[in-house]
Amino acid sequence: MKASGRGSWWPKSVAGADAAAAPGRERRASRGGIFRPWRRACLVGLASVVVQVTAATAPPRDYTSKAPRFTFAGTLPEQEEQLRENPLLRRYQASRRAAADDPHRPLYHFSSPEGPLNDPNGLCFWQGRWHLFYQTRPREDARWHWGHAVSDDLVHWRDLPLALYPNPEEQCYSGSILIEEDRAIAMYHGRELGNMVAVSRDPLLLNWEKLTGTAVIPLRQDGRHHHFLSAEPLPYRVYDPCIWKKDGIYYSLSGAVDYTGPGGRPVLAEFLFRSRDLVQWEYMHPFVESNAFTRVGDDGACPYFLPLGDRHILLFFSHTTSGQYLLGDYDRRRDKFAATAHGRFNFGAVLPGGVHAPSATSDGQGGVIAIFNVNSAFSSAARRGDGVMSLPRRLTLIGRDEMGIEPAGNLASLRYEPQRVGPMRLPANQEIVLESVRGSALEIEAEIDPGNAPTVELNVLRAPQAEEVTRIALFKNRDVTSRFMPPQRALSVVTLDGTRASLLPDVLSRPPESAPVFVAPNEPFKLRVFVDRGIVEVFVNGRQCLALRVHPGRADSVGVSLRAQGQEATLRSLTAWRMKAI
């Protein structure tokens, strides 16, 4: 690498940038080698110096994927004609038909047609359609590729062939997509190689070309192959990237860790790079400042940095505490992000059965559309990889440090056979089973006035004698924003409890998840609950969301009930719809 002054950071030439170079397998670092403290002494002064990232060469290795690969025409009618006869898509269709009766496979949440589903990647809107990419392992090759689906409404997804295949990288890890007028730019982590750039220009984003044929931000520097978590003496780490454009210049974050926590322990870090041409990249500095929110041990994988109203949001995944976000201000002159608020998308452990990594994109109206993979709760090797996608969520700015969150997409198109209940009184300490509301694939809209009841429960996926049940508990005014800093607001708490959701011996339960939510003094709890066989998602008053995989084992775990604890409450209204498969 070579340091240069800020006035001369742009390369004069990109000669040799197209030479493909695939390094050998990364060296096996010991645990102590990966997590040893960052030697800050050797980096004095680098925080304010731009570092040129240089391409490196190494003996190439052949990582060509064994999965079927296709080249498609350049017009939409031609592509659609080719897709009708595509053998991989025909195989996907057969796989979906064969799995349709699996009681643990959701009806209206997206899941992989075959093979495991891991991180979502590169959610974007291109030529009138939504595109979702995701990590999957095809039958022929047990390495991560990018799967691909397309939708007109964020709800009804259509499978497309694999998008990104490994080679020269060993596997295709996570990344994001930037949409320009004439092309889509994917930036992602290529295992053993570094951060890659691929470009597509066709109507359905079926054909992808990798720029330079190697990593544009390589793990190999100065003749040494660095581990993505332990890169001394480099001032940065190379891992999951995101990409955006400002004033004609491309910017990218590399989400990883820095060893500046207590005792040299790892803390979240996002390392900022910039480029004029997507090929030659310059390291700038750590991007996030004023972060007193995340935990020691967190990392910043799967980053997405986007405008949200008149502020910015950084979504990321921590391998310790899962999906989260930082809300704050983007200093466009200094290229720094000052965080002023923080929130979580998972309120428990990463595994089992929890919300995992995000993919996100701007909605064109000041909001952000985000989607997450949600892990399986099965312990058996055969089903551990059965991840599914959450429903798409629309994130909005509803206060300086407050984010709104609502379900996105045309979910109403899935509803049928509505059942309505209420208004009705909920007597204290008595469970009321709603005999007319039953099903394993439901949407429930409910307004509940807790009155003075300490707790009100809405239970779903309930067996006849509650042998299995997933519990949603509502606690009014049980938390507070701050006892020392005005304005002080009382917060309510919502709990999603799947500890008794399944009797199956290979389903792992997780501690109940509890999340704070602001509910105004005279405001009822307004719930939108989505039940889809083995996944439950709960949206609360447009300000909070929890999700959980539960996997009931009984076919009759389809009941719904309500209970007020201690004192009576009021169900103002409840409407439940059965939901169609997508």
Image (cartoon, rainbow, N blue to C red):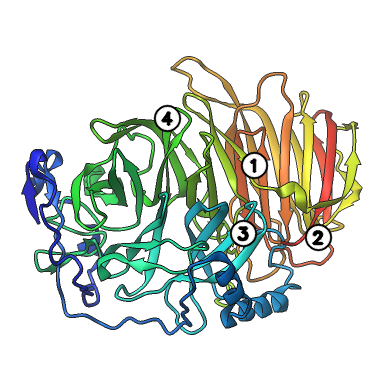
Dot 1 corresponds to which residue?
A: 495
How far apart marks 1 and 2 lie (CA) works out to: 20 Å
Q: Secondary structure at mark 2?
A: loop
> Which mark's residue is nearer the viewer, 3 or 4?
4
Q: Between disc 2 and disc 3, whose residue precedes?
A: 3
Q: Is 495 or 313 nearer to us in this picture?
A: 313
How far apart marks 3 and 1 lie (CA) works out to: 15 Å
Q: Residue at x 45, y 80 (%)?
A: 142
As displayed, is residue 520 above or below residue 309?
Answer: above
Q: Between disc 4 and disc 2, whose residue precedes?
A: 4
How far apart marks 4 and 2 lie (CA) works out to: 44 Å
How far apart marks 3 and 4 lie (CA) works out to: 37 Å
Q: Residue at x 60, y 33 (%)?
A: 543
Question: In which quadrant of the rendered view does residue 16 lie?
Answer: bottom left
Question: In which quadrant of the rendered view does residue 378 lie?
Answer: bottom right
Q: Residue at x 63, y 66 (%)?
A: 507
Q: Amino acid at mark 1?
A: Thr
The answer to whether residue 506 is seen in the rendering is: yes
As displayed, is residue 191 above or below residue 174?
Answer: below
Q: What label sits on residue 509 in the rendered view?
A: 3
Q: Position of residue 523 (x, y in %)?
A: 72, 23
Q: Position of residue 27 (x, y in %)?
A: 21, 73
Q: Amino acid at mark 3?
A: Ser
Q: Are marks 3 and 4 in contact (CB under 8 Å)?
A: no
Q: Residues within 10 Å of mark 4 (few under 14, many from 20)?
A: some
Q: Is 411 or 440 nearer to us in this picture?
A: 411
Dot 2 corresponds to which residue?
A: 557
> Which mark's residue is nearer the viewer, 4 or 2?
4
Q: Between disc 1 and disc 2, whose residue precedes?
A: 1
Q: Between disc 3 and disc 1, whose residue precedes?
A: 1
Q: Are marks 3 and 1 in contact (CB under 8 Å)?
A: no
> Which mark's residue is nearer the viewer, 4 or 1?
4
